[in-house]
Image: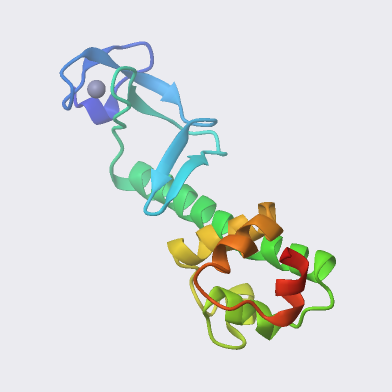
Amino acid sequence: MSIFQLEPGVVARCLFCRQNAVSVRELKGRTFDLRDEYDLRFDESMCAPVCAKCGDIYVRGASLRRFSDVLERLYDERKRAAVEDFVAVIDHDFSDVPRHRWEEVLGVSAGYVSRLQKGSRNLSGPLEVLMRGLTRAPLETLRIIGYSRRLPAALAARVK
Ligand SMILES: [Zn+2]
């Protein structure tokens, strides 16, 4: 019997780590990495053969498509949240600073944040790191950015 069609309760040898540790398990609640996003928590109920030792998952065909679709959705949600959380902080805590000043700070063109919000641009890993820093610890992150570029006057005054 193929490891991909394992029956619940049956244990098989892992093709990757060779341990006798593959059995059908629930994926919901497990975390996975996809490209530049880490620890995406699988949030749908789906069972698949998983190795308890090395974590290898045995999915193909329709199961692989479903597994990938969930991870791609979680990936998009993570990226969208980074942009929305950033916008919420700058709109709320820095309402006196125009959006294009923040775009200067981030080193992107005017209107770029709006394009990220609309989804017509993809959020790169480095820009996401900056945005998450500014969201969680705005003044500390601005201070660090200030080491490499001149901050707009309104923001430089806040950091002093
Ligand atoms: Zn394994």
Which residue is at the far front?
Answer: 160
Query: In the figure, 59 relative to 20: above or below?
Result: below
Residue in the image at 78% along x and 79% along y: 97
Query: How does the figure colour the protein chain or chains?
Result: rainbow
Against 88, residue 69 (above or below) is above
Quadrant placement of the C terminus = bottom right
| Quadrant of the displayed image that contains ligand 1 | top left
Question: Residue 71, how many percent across, how many down?
Answer: 46, 48
**138 sits to left or right of 150:** right
> Which image quadrant for residue 131?
bottom right
Q: Is residue 34 above or below residue 160?
A: above
**Residue at point 28%, 28% (across, down):** 5
Which is nearer the eye, 64 or 15?
15
* Among the 4 quarters of the image, the one containing residue 100: bottom right
| View extreme (bottom): residue | 110
Does residue 82 show up? no
Q: Position of residue 7 (x, y in %)?
A: 33, 19
Examine the rendered structure and indicate whether residue 95 appears above or below residue 9. below
